[in-house]
Amino acid sequence: MRFLLRRLGFYAVALWGAITLNYVLPRLMPGSPIDGLLARLSPAQLAANPQSVDNLREALGYEKEPFVSGYITYLGQVVRGDFGISTSNFPSPVTEVIGRTLPYSIFLVGVAFLVAFALGTLLGMVAAWRRGGLVDNVVTPTLMAVGAFPAFFTSLLAVYFLGLEAGWFPIQHAYDTDLSPGLNGEFLGSVIRHAQLPMLVIVAVFAGGWLLSMRNVMINTIEEDYVAMAKAKGLRDFRVMTMYAGRNAILPPLTGFASQFGAAVGGLVFIEFVFSYPGVGLTLQQAALGSDYPLAQALLLVLAVCVLAANFLMDCLYVVLDPRVRSA
Amino acid sequence: MAAAEPEAHLDGPPAVLAADMPGERPASRRRLRLPGWARLLLRNPKSCFGIVALAAMVLVALLAPVIAQNSPSDIVGLPGQPPNRDFWFGTTDQGYDVFAQVVWGARTSLAVGAAAALMSTVIAATLGMLAAFSGGWIDDTINLVTNVFLVIPALPLLIVVYSFVPQRGPIVMVLILGLTTWAVEARILRGQALSLRNRDFIQAAKVSGESTWRIVFGELMPNMVSRIAAGFLLVFYLSIIFAAGLEFLGFGDVNKTTWGTTLYWAQNNSTVLQGEWWHFVFPGVALALAVAALVFINYGIDELANPRLRRRTRSSLRRRLLGLPPRESVTS
């Protein structure tokens, strides 16, 4: 319990750090974000709307208040979930845009990342168990090479070869454009069909990392006495591999979950961009390019919260898996 | 250890003293040591592939004007040609030479990656060693900041930072990448420094009243060089990927030639959907090769540092010669 409370405390600090970063960043930069917005408007547009500068300033809330009291106001807004209006989706509030896009991303990255974890860990076990066997000699280097590829290049190749040339998968958007979102079989089927290829890419990119870390830890556990003991008892090979060697080898790879999941959330931006998938990653890219600061900042916070929440789930799992944490 | 060496000179005859002049010593030591680890790395097939591939890339980048006759930013041929005798990698939708863009892009992409990695390594090494060595609240603070940076997803953070930057280009990219990627390395180096902190030679330096900065940079750092070098490669890899990725998403200077911007134009002209595979495959392969080279060098270093990851051909041979049963008979 104390372990989990300590972790929760750390995540609270991390979240506060992300919020503070969000507040400080635009104020650290040379020039004002307003200038960036104004640079996108033509002189004629500016001349036609002389108040637009003041209106923008008002809408974004910059330079209205001094640093410290502005910070307190900002914290209050974040706590209330008030992120302002998305300038690129005017007049939708930021929360509405996020509510529309987040479910797609959670579905995409959640399912694919768990599959990558399960598959990579299992293959890593087999690779260590049958050292120099087929899995170790063929699957390990292949997945390592694919995992080393930049995610967006893998996505481009997948779109071109598997989507376009082979025609096995739909390549753009999250569902057929002639359908409207709703909880019916046709729509959900379309969503699943469209998610297949992006998910395949995520699995291919991330399974290699799990495979390698699992394999490298497992190579050490295999030499432990309790594994020899389990074998000597005559237990089935698969049982010794999963319940004895694998069960104990899985803890160190799990601690790498934080950085892996963070990387997956980053990879999501590329994958959604290449597949025109309407999730938070693509929205973040468009918001940042279009100087929609309220939306971009809120999305950073949402993604940070997602990563922190996933980390906390992992901590809970860790407590279940490792009795030493419970007693400490 | 290093602190004790000057004392030894005093006992030796003058001739030895002359041969051991400070200027001479590091040179002779380096001549002995550098081939040592280099040979080890080259003997490992993974890191050997990585080193050769990276060296080839750097060579291509340096010789860009010789290798590519066409300028990467001139319209030199008919648009949208597939690879042919004149344009080995084809031309873009605007008629630029893709081969020239890939070759010249290597320059910027590798240079940005290396510069960002250098900056990040300096920050990470300083903070990591300072944290481990100072202990107390300094350690706690640095450790907390490092961990916070580690759990905030890096790419979204980079994108948001980039949205606020008024200017875009390679130098801004280096600064931003350097300031955001140091956390991974800082944590590793802090751990390494913590394990070294209580060794005798550090204690000796402390007792003899050396300043903290001197101990950290004169005693601690030389013993962490290999770990710092491995960390540099890791951040080099991250920086190249992040830089290309950000440029691909449109956050670079789209008029500069890098692998990332070439890929950005490929995506922007929807070459994938039009089947013009050469526009994105060649810069992508170049990028993937550079990144894979770094990853493979790091795998090689891992295997050198952790002998258990290596195939035990040598030791099993020795065991057989000694008449011991082969160790792996149970598993195979």
Image (cartoon, rainbow, N blue to C red):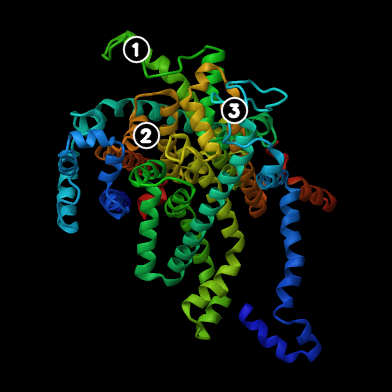
Residues at marks 3 and 1, CA–CA distance in whole angstroms: 29 Å
Q: Is residue A240 visible?
A: no
In the image, A109 versus A247, the foreground residue is A109
Name the mark nearer the viewer: 3 or 1: 3
Horizontal side, residue A312 vs residue B114: left or right: left
Give the residue drawn at x 36%, y 47%.
B165
A322 relative to A207, above or below: below
Earlier along the polypeptide chain: callout 1 or callout 2?
1
Label 2 sits on residue: A285
Q: Residue A218: name its quadrant.
A: top right
Residues at marks 1 and 2, CA–CA distance in whole angstroms: 22 Å
Q: Chain of mark 3?
A: B
Horizontal side, residue B37 vs residue A6: left or right: right
Label 1 sits on residue: A177
Density class for disc 3 (Cα within 10 Å; few <14, some 14-19, many ≥20) is some
Element carrying mark 3: helix
Horizontal side, residue A203 vs residue A146: left or right: left
Density class for disc 2 (Cα within 10 Å; few <14, some 14-19, many ≥20) is many
A88 relative to B106, above or below: above
Looking at the picture, which amino acid does disc 1 mark? Thr
In the image, A9 versus B276, the foreground residue is B276
Element carrying mark 1: loop
